Amino acid sequence: MKKLNLPKLLIFVIVFYAAIQILYSTEMMNGYILHIINQSLIYVILAVSLNLINGITGQFSLGHMGFAGVGAYVSGTISTLVFKINPSTPGGMGIFILAIVVGGLAAAFVGFLIGFPSLRLKGDYLAIVTLGFGEIIRTIFNNIDYVGGPRGLLGIPKFSNFTTITVAALITIVVIRNLVESSHGRAMLAIRENELAAELVGVNTTHYKVLAFVIGAFFAGIAGGLFAHLLQMAHPTQFGFIKSVEVLIMIYAGGVGSITGSTIAAFALTFLSEGLRIGIRAIADATGLPIGGEWRMVVYSLLLIFIMLFKTEGLMGTKEAKLIRLKEVE
Amino acid sequence: MKRLSLVLVLALVAASIVTAQDIKVGGVGPVTGEAATFGVSTKNGIMLAAEEWNDKGGLFGNRKVKIIFEDDKGDPAEGATVYTKLIQQDNVVAIIGTVMSKVTLAGAPIAQAAGIPMISSTSTNEMVTKVGDYIYRACFIDPFQGTVGANFAYKDLGARKAAALFDIGNDYTKGLAENFRNQFLKLGGQVVAFEGHPFGATDFKAQLTKILAGKPDVLYLSDYYNDVGLIAKQARELGFKGQMVGGDGWDSPDLVKIGGKAVDNGFFTNHYAAADPRPIVQDFVKKYKAKFGAEPDAMATLAYDAANIMFDAIRRAGSTKGSAIRDALKTTNLNVVSGQVTFDANRNPIKSAVIIEMKDGKQVYRTTVNP
């Protein structure tokens, strides 16, 4: 059996974690950079979990942020409206973790609901159904006054920090990576490669497609919950179709099916978007050209087009980094 | 990847070198995305105000104001990032922005936690300034506009039966309509229908038929100009003879292009009127037109006012310390384009609203309503 070399990955993550913490506490790195890192890590969870559905199982979902929305609203409701915790509440951290997990489970349940009836559909048709489902979820939040309706759910306590987000991202990568190499994951890959052939060799395609949706939605829900507790708010427009496309772009830019690719792309694109903000300002200041922040998205989009033109398979293709390659174990 | 990160680091270093003399103030607005025109107007207003202060010698006699303007895309997540950047990376002393309430609500807790005073130009959601004592705004809030609209409909137009139609998915239009309803009922009027329509609708006849069955004298339309234009047209087609009243979402030249004759003799509450004879208004309109080639809309005006309120507070504080500027903001009493402004205990401005009448496709200044 093949398994992930967990100690090696853990050491890497601990070094990464310690380095960031040291840089931050010695003020060599400011809160802005830390915020971008936090955001990148949340996008890692979103991209890796979407990759399980789109990249590994080969289903085309356009409603991933809908699941994140469920996680955000459910966990936000638990922490803000039910328990009314804040970071100084004794035991608040425990309730926060509980809220995040319940948010993930709620999203997984919605993933089950959406996965089940949509499975007769393939490709473009499934994409449209998931798109519709994502929009339905968003509209529901928009119309529930208890969670703020169109004003959004406000005053969510700030519990998400670099530590909690890093741990969640690590768990996501480990679970999904191990899953892919298990017999379940093999079945999912078989569905991607050829659904008919997979069915002929006895793979229960319905079961595995639902499983991919449920697990993908669970982690998306976790990411949504963390996001809400980082921004201290959840707003229906954050979980719309455009946002789902942003995550989709990450998995395509990173390489469909590659967890390493999704991780790198989540970091690279988040930093690129912010780097351009500063880069364009520097160019404008140096040359006196009347270009402002609005050019940022133009350059960003051009870069994406170039990645897709010259590296159609994405940055990593289907390859994985050595760090999370699997080893034969007894 | 290595090369990319090197470029990023270099860019970060380059950006951090700014003349020490300048006072850095952050500006935020959605210059891209769904509300891009609002963002551009906001940016213009802030830039014009900063330019005027710098022409007069800047703050404290010799220190120029440097605006660092960032795009928030109309997205709360992006807003949180931008506020963090301005405060942590650029070390701004204060922030002017942003436009949409949902984005301001993501940024405000960050400014509050860092002790950086901020003033939003146009976020009307009541919750915004409740985030904390460093958060101010330059526009009046939803209750005020709805209340003024109801008072005007009941007292000036003599309406007794009213109906409201609004976008159910938009907190602003919903808030206005709710406050209109409450005030109209309080005055002793009757609200015969209170209907929401879905976002992006173009056919309102189902809702209008239901509304008109109650025979209202006045129709309150809190939507933006594009929806209002269509609703007005369809209401007239269905035989509505009464008057229409709305909020500042009407303020666009496109209202007449879409609504045509149907919006004639309609009234709306607004922050300022370009035809207002006060010299400060006429001076601003002239300067804005000369610089940007267009008449300033409410977004530009409020951004200009917000910037002036903030610069004035920094000047009076005599320091760039956050707490000092906050205290100075509290005692603001300044004549700006949208009126004489002071702040209440919740850091909302106390100032007048104007009522504008649509006459033959043109905006005519009708009256000023004091709070």
Image (cartoon, grey):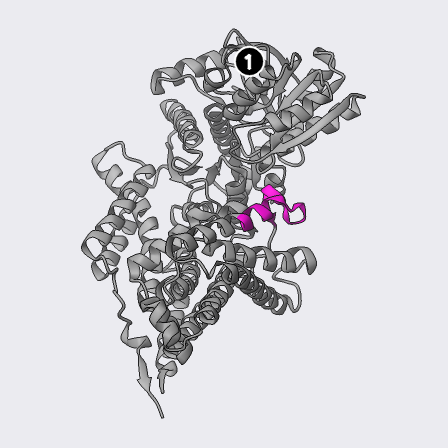
In the rendered view, does A172 fall on the left or right side of A229?
left
Chain of the residue on which disc 1 is drawn: B
The answer to whether residue A234 is seen in the rendering is no
Q: Is residue A145 magenta?
A: yes
Q: Residue furthest bottom?
A: A330
Q: Quadrant of residue A2?
A: bottom left
Residue A75: image quadrant is: bottom right
Q: Position of residue B188 (x, y in %)?
A: 81, 21
**Magenta extent:** A136-154
Q: Is residue A193 above or below residue B52?
A: below
> In the drawing, does residue A207 fall left or right of residue B124?
left
**Residue neighbourhood size for the residue with mark 1, other residues' Cα within 10 Å, grouped as few (<14), some (14–19), many (≥20):** many
Furthest-top residue in this view: B360
Q: Quadrant of residue A296?
A: top left
Q: Quadrant of the N terminus of chain B?
A: bottom left
What is the x, y in percent for residue B114? 51, 49
Residue A294 within the segment the image draws in magenta: no
Q: Secondary structure at mark 1?
A: helix
Return the x and y of residue B134 as percentages of the image width and height.
57, 42
Q: Amino acid at mark 1?
A: Ala
Residue at the limit of the structure toward the left, as seen here? A310
A196 versus B334 height, above or below: below
- Residue A49 in the image, given as x and y percentages of width and height: 43, 64
Q: Residue at x 59, y 40 (%)?
A: B128
Q: Residue at x 28, y 72 (%)?
A: A321
Across the whole image, how many numbered discs are drawn on residues? Answer: 1
Residue in front for this viewpoint, A272 or B185: B185
Q: Quadrant of the C terminus of chain B?
A: top right
Query: Which residue was labeled with disc 1?
Result: B262
